[in-house]
Amino acid sequence: MPSATFQVQRGGAGGGRLETYTTEVAEGMVVLDAVLQIQAEQAPDLAVRWNCKAGRCGSCSAEINGMPKLMCMTRLSDLPPGKPILLQPMKAFPLIKDLVTDVSWNFRVKKMIKKFKPRPPDAADGTWRMAQEDVDRVQEFRKCIECFLCQDVCHVLREHHLFEEFIGPRFFVHVASLEMHPLDVEDRREELKKADGIGYCNITKCCTQVCPEDIHITDNAIIPLKERVVDKFYDPLKRLFGRWRGK
Ligand code: SF4
Ligand code: F3S
Ligand code: FES
């Protein structure tokens, strides 16, 4: 049976080291299969987070040969043959141990975003009517599995560590799903400009490239949100009109 060699980052926040493991591999195996095999046969204390093994839970995010990816959706046959495979934890978040990082900052950010606020029912039967195209627009954003790979790759968090000023691409997708929802009447533009730091995004599109759900994060969520912020705060006609009205 063929084998593959892995260089796995081991250790905690105090300092990591690369450990080399060689394990047997078979056709169809994904990186997570090999990691669990190494854990079962050679390194029972190897820390790895996973749950569904089907690309649905977003738990197994890591960096494979330096690229943010889901371990359960990355086939060994798609990696360069005959070369060691480098496995590291996501770099943007605090390391807990080995391949496991603390992503709890993301859940705190989500709680700060204004919730869904529907307009009153507008149909005679006490329900709402929505145009199908308006429903379709937000469906894409609801595919997010909260793997946080987009957060990991975005330089604003990864290199500049602006965790206090910038909510990151995952949460621009979340805000877009609310702002563009046909029933929602909340206004989140002031937060987008100030607390959420949308101005820090300089449209590098790295987030879109790593999204395992193929969400067009930059084109369909971030750029339209930036346009809404510009409309509210920088549109000269609106500002002039607002001044006449004493606003
Ligand atoms: Fe993951 Fe894509 Fe959601 Fe970002 S937007 S958390 S990359 S699924
Ligand atoms: Fe970051 Fe994506 Fe913008 S990677 S800079 S949020 S386009
Ligand atoms: Fe659930 Fe990989 S284990 S996405």
Image: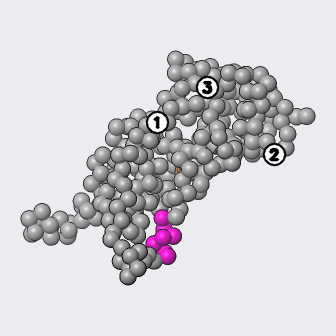
- Residue linked to disc 1: 104
Query: Does dot 2 land on a helix, a strand or a loop?
Result: loop
Does residue 173 appear to the left or right of 29 in the view shown? Answer: left
Amino acid on which the number 3 mark rests in the picture: Asp
137 magenta-colored: yes
- What residue do we see at 32% from left, 65% from top? 185
Q: Quick check: 220 above or below 145?
A: below
Does residue 65 appear to the left or right of 15 in the view shown? Answer: right
- Residue linked to disc 3: 98
- What residue do we see at 62% from left, 34% from top? 49
Residue 122 in percent (x, y) is at 35, 77
Mark linked to residue 28: 2
**Image quadrant assignment for residue 74:** top right
Mark before the other along the chain sequence, 1 or 3: 3
Q: Report the span colored magenta.
A: 132-138
Q: How many marks?
A: 3
Viewer-side label of 2, 1: 1
Residue 46 in percent (x, y) is at 67, 24
Amino acid on which the number 2 mark rests in the picture: Gly
C-alpha distance separating marks 1 and 3: 17 Å
Mark linked to residue 168: none
Mark before the other along the chain sequence, 3 or 2: 2
Query: Does dot 1 land on a helix, a strand or a loop?
Result: helix
Residue 127 in percent (x, y) is at 41, 74
